[in-house]
Image (spheres, rainbow, N blue to C red):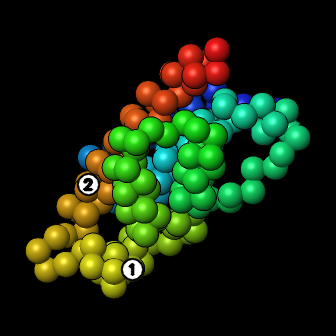
Amino acid sequence: MPQIGENDYRDGAKERIAGAEMLLQGGQLAEAVYLAGRAVEGMLRALIWKADPDYRLGRKPLEAGHNPRELLAMVGELGLLSWRDDVMWYRIVSVSARWANNMRYVPRRWIESYWRSIGVVTNTCTMKRAAGDFFNVCIKIVTRCEGIYENIDKKYA
């Protein structure tokens, strides 16, 4: 299998968020939630790979697994976040509390039950609304990451 690079992570993340939106519109909530979370993970990986040649060249392993908080911490350590990115941290914590890579294996009822247990799905917030809210947070993260990605070359020029 060929090496995956920062452009692959970035393009894949954009495809994942677009796919998540289509699935959400089609009522496939579990699938939409999973793909939206993957989009966030992919964009964070793209930032890390683009900004740090040690990852790109295989000198350092990217061992954050599928944990958006750990990936964002790595992005922060690379100096890619500004003071205004407190909102980004908040959004990542929010996504991390509601998403896990293993969601690819579970049915909608499992996600809905889990989200109910953590207070995301309630008597006044349906699974459909919660999935839409989750998607909206993920697309904001992906959009912010895209802005950071575009400016990496300027930062390191």
Numbered tag placed on residue 114 in the rendering: 1
Q: Nearer the viewer, residue 74 or 143?
A: 74
Answer above or below: position of 71 versus 7. below
- Mark 2 or mark 1: which comes first in sequence? 1
Q: Residue 132, which numbered label?
A: 2
Identified at 37% across, 50% down, the residue is 86
Q: Residues within 10 Å of mark 2 (few under 14, many from 20)?
A: some
Measured as percent of width and height from the top left, residue 69 is found at 54, 59
**Extreme right residue here?**
59
Q: Position of residue 130 (x, y in %)?
A: 25, 63
The residue positioned 58% from the left and 38% from the top of the image is 79
Quadrant of the image occupied by residue 53? top right
The reply, left or right, for residue 58 in relation to residue 46 is right
Q: Which residue appears at 27% of the width and 73% of the height?
A: 120
Q: Say which quadrant the N terminus sits in.
A: top right
Q: Is residue 91 above or below residue 15?
A: below
Nearer to me, 137 or 72:
72
Q: Is residue 35 left or right of residue 132?
A: right
The amino acid at mark 2 is Gly
Left or right: 70 in relation to 52: left
Residue 31 visible in this rendered orientation of the protein: no
Q: Residue furthest bottom?
A: 117
Q: Quadrant of the C terminus?
A: top right
Q: Exactly how many numbered labels are in the figure? A: 2
Amino acid beneath label 1: Tyr
* C-alpha span from label 2 to label 1: 16 Å
- Above or below, 70 against 26 in this view is below
Q: Considering the numbered disc 2 on the image, is that residue within a helix, a strand or a loop?
A: helix
Residue 149, image x, y percentages:
53, 28
